[in-house]
Image (spheres, rainbow, N blue to C red):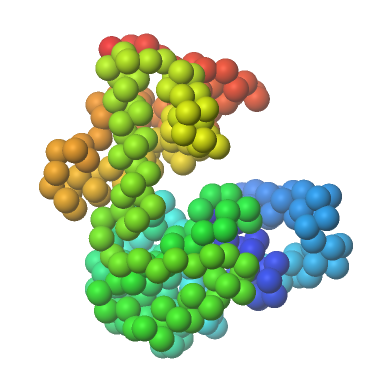
Amino acid sequence: MGNGIAHIFALHGFTTILVDVQEAQLARAQGTIKKNLERQLKKELIAEDEKLATLANLSTTTSLSEGVHQANLVIEAATEDFTVKQKIFSTIDQESPSDTILATNTSSISITKLAATTNRPAQVIGMHFMNPVPVMKLVEIINGYATDSAVTEIIRNTAVILQKTPLIVNDYPGFVSNRILMPMINEAIYTLHEGVAGVAEIDQIMQLGMAHPMGPLRLADFIGLDVCLSIMRVLHHGFGNPKYAPCPLLINMVAAQRLGVKSGEGFYDYSEGVKSQKIAQQFAD
């Protein structure tokens, strides 16, 4: 997500600094951005000078303090873990200018709760991009309890500059996107777990019958099963309703590190370019 967000900001003329703790990750991100720019160029979505300007607008650093010390806007896109995000927000809050807006790309964690860990809760907001960021049009903008309306308007206008469609929601577990999407994915996993149908059948029924571009189990693999589990736990804890309880199969697959695309195997096998269905039956039993 981070490299996709950096890509679109740099493409639309913003001086952009991409931060990660590892040089190898930054090098990988830069390679991905270059590859995606070449793809856009080949499709005539951008011109050669736009590609070069995008790369010129983009720099990287492993120092979070260095990355944010002159920033007008910081977008955190770390793993979906409150403790990790809280630590990052603490550093950003201390090291960035007092008028800097602090945004998070979280897909479920409370904006209000994150904002309360800073000295500027009025300047904290959710800016939830969809993956792949250069392609997907939606930006779900989430107001925390204390978010200033002027900050919301700045972020809305920024999303428009990025040629995205900003839709503003309030801070409740899962917001809108994942409050609806994740229970559907969880129910698809329950459907597999209970032996109602196989992986391919579940996905194809949703694709062919409901016009979904991707089946829910394939989508879960692309999101990351660990992320899906984290979001379901946020929903379950936030609402206290058993309908949000994560499926035991999802819990077991994450424990076994079958995380989807990122680990090479989830509901499908992604090793060495393989796209065939491959799920360990013992986890479903």
Q: Is residue 156 left or right of residue 28?
A: left
- Using the rendered view, name the quadrant where residue 225 is placed: top left
Q: Judge whether 254 appears above or below 143 on screen.
A: above
Q: Is residue 120 above or below residue 224?
A: below
Above or below: residue 139 compared with residue 155: above
Query: 30 or 154, which is in the foreground?
Result: 154
Q: Is residue 174 left or right of residue 38?
A: left
For this orientation, the residue located farthest to the right is 48
Q: x, y percentage for residue 61?
A: 59, 65
The image shows residue 256 at horizontal and vertical percentages of 36, 25
Which residue is at 29% across, 25% downward? 190
Q: Is residue 239 above or below residue 162?
A: above
Seen at 16% across and 51% down, the residue is 239
**In this view of the protein, which residue sits in the foreground, 167 or 230?**
167
Q: Which quadrant is the C terminus positioned in? A: top left
Is residue 62 something that shows in the picture? no
Which of the two residues, 93 or 285, is positioned nearer the viewer here? Answer: 285
So how many labels did they put on this image?
Answer: 0
Is residue 201 visible in the rendered image? The answer is: yes
Q: Residue at x 52, y 82 (%)?
A: 72
Residue 15: quarter of image: bottom right
Residue 196: x %, y % from top left: 32, 15
In the rendered image, residue 144, in percent from the top left (x then y), is placed at 30, 72
